[in-house]
Image (cartoon, helix red, strand yellow):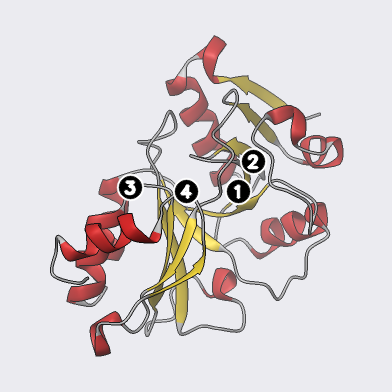
Amino acid sequence: MSEFVSIERGGAPAARSALERTIAGGGVVVFPSDGVYGLACDPLDAAAIGRIHQLKGRDDGKPSAVMYFSPLAFRELLAGLGPRTAAAAVALLPGPVTLIVANPGHRYPLACRQDLGRLGLRLIAGPLAGAMCPVLQTSANLSGEPAPRALAGVPESIRAGADLVIDGGELPGLPSTVVDISSIDADGDWEVLRPGAISEGDLFAALTSVGLG
């Protein structure tokens, strides 16, 4: 049976502690992101990643983003990015944005799958902010179905198959905006791959503020 934690009733610190404990133990978590509910596990744990793909009915060759909840934990990875990439990340994160960055060191290969040269990264705020464990994350829906904004919208099969379910109430319901900045250090270019919670105009304004618009 899945462990259940309510942020409203138990508090954010208890939810963060349960998240960190479950991820460290090789478990799978249903959790509230900043827009929709997601599934998370250790990005270096092949067995846990396989469980997520099985729960979703998802092609296991499809890449996933690595999400951070703590700027401090994110800082180590940030130091390995190119200067323009790092500046873009500082301008846009934390927030409802997934950044596709160049990954010459092939970090988190299980998240990258076949495209080892690029990596999706997220850093979010909210009640789970401060948790120190990076996670592989994907939306908590069956493959091809809408991403849920409330825990009740997460399929029962996914909730039952997870080790921990965190209830964060109703969320905005908008997925992250996916922005490819993998060539921004080489040529200054960036591209929106999926519209989402942040408009292209707001992206342009944020990047212009650090000389990258």
- Real-space CA distance between mark 1 and mark 3, rounded to the nearest whole angstrom: 18 Å
Q: Nearer the viewer, mark 4 or mark 2?
A: 4
Q: Amino acid at mark 1?
A: Ala
Residue at 25% x, 82% y is 188
Where 70 sits versus 212, above or below?
above
Q: How many residues crowd around disc 2 within 10 Å: few (fewer than 14), some, or many (20 or more)?
A: many
Q: Secondary structure at mark 3?
A: loop
Tags 3 and 2 touching, CB below 8 Å:
no
Q: Quadrant of the C terminus?
A: bottom left
Where residue 63 sits: x, y (%)? Answer: 61, 71
Which residue is disc 3 drawn over?
94
Residue at 46% x, 53% y is 67
Residue at 33% x, 59% y is 201
Q: Nearer the viewer, mark 1 or mark 4?
A: 4
Q: Quadrant of the N terminus?
A: top right
Where 60 sits versus 182, above or below?
above
Q: How many residues crowd around disc 4 within 10 Å: few (fewer than 14), some, or many (20 or more)?
A: some
Which residue is disc 1 drawn over?
40
- Real-space CA distance between mark 1 and mark 2, rounded to the nearest whole angstrom: 5 Å
Where residue 41 sits: x, y (%)? Answer: 60, 51
